[in-house]
Amino acid sequence: MTERHGIGFIGLGSIGQRMLTQAWNHPRVKPTVAWDLATERLAQTVANSAGLRAAEDVNSLINDDSVDVVYIASPPLTHAVYANAALECGKPVLCEKPLGIDVATSEALVARASASGIAHGVNFIFASAHPATQIEQALARAELGEIKGAEAHLHLPNWARRRYAEAPWLMESDQGGFVREVLSHFIYLTERLFGPAVISNSRCRQGVRPGSAVTGVVAELTCGDIPINVYGSTLGCGPDVCNYTVWGEQCSYRVYNLYGLQVTTGERWLDSNNADTDPASDWHQRQYDQLAAMLDGQPHTLPDFASGLSVQRLIEGILAG
């Protein structure tokens, strides 16, 4: 039987819990040890997960012999500290996005990770999700014709209400907000599809309370001569919108609701998801496929820390206006 790689989970918030649930269902990985600052949540998770042990602290998790890769799902300000500790121990790392908040700190982390030769990646959805793969293949076939532009459209009042209640730190400007938490996925997708991006201009609407995360953003980026437009808000009433469209001369593709995919030749949008799959579950399983390949030393699509730093620079640049 092929070896399963043991994962140590640092952080058991909503994202960490979703990754944990999906890891049990994958044939090449297995959760072994977990740690969370919220001791009650840690105890409850371990009690409900046969085979998962609680670590006394982060260092004991990293040094545990059953941990082959350290997964970091704690708030962004801790990412560099925990990633550096794992690298110091010689352990591969999968880090949640954003890679960090302070660019200089992330630059030092990237230099260390790159020099170490230790496998490392950032958990961007579109590293392996079906929409990214299909659009990338369509571009390679020149199916879209000349690319006229791309746009990210986010309207997330319900997401903000739910996520800010789950993780109050997301409400704060120092490391939270939908621009870092959601838009970063689409900035990664943009650079994956079209290469390095440059910010032309951006404007952000600040929250009413001092120190609160932004409530709106309008920005324009360019990838070569391709314009990338960004519109986002957490204000107002209505269903959440989480879409990314690539406009081509012959056909266009749209990622909708983060995981779905549609295509049009000008008449109407047609569904283009994989048949008989749940898009969110499919993404997690594909991502674990790529993590296993990374740990096996095989080719994979997980972005490294340098790619995560590129996204971080753009996100922080957009927020700076």
Image (cartoon, rainbow, N blue to C red):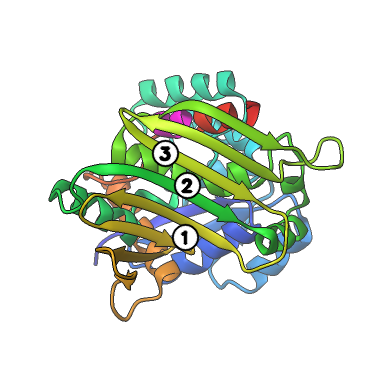
Mark 1 closeness class: few <14, some 14–19, many ≥20 residues within 10 Å: many
What's the mark number on residue 185?
Answer: 2
> Marks 3 and 2: CB-CB under 8 Å?
no
The C terminus sits in image quarter:
top right
Closest to the observer, 183 or 69:
183
Which residue matches tag 1? 258
Q: Position of residue 248 (x, y in %)?
A: 26, 50
Report helix, strand or loop for mark 3.
strand
Q: Is residue 287 left or right of residue 311?
A: left
What's the mark number on residue 228?
Answer: 3
Residue drawn at x 69%, y 49% as measured from the top left: 56
Q: Position of residue 32 (x, y in %)?
A: 51, 59
Asked if one can make out residue 96 in the rendered structure from this viewpoint, the answer is no
Query: Spatial distance from mark 1 to mark 2, Cα to Cα?
Result: 9 Å
Residue drawn at x 47%, y 60% as measured from the top left: 258
Q: Which residues are magenta?
A: 306-311
> Marks 1 and 3: CB-CB under 8 Å?
no
Type of the residue with mark 3: Ile
Type of the residue with mark 2: His
Is 232 part of what is drawn in magenta?
Answer: no
What's the mark number on residue 191?
Answer: none
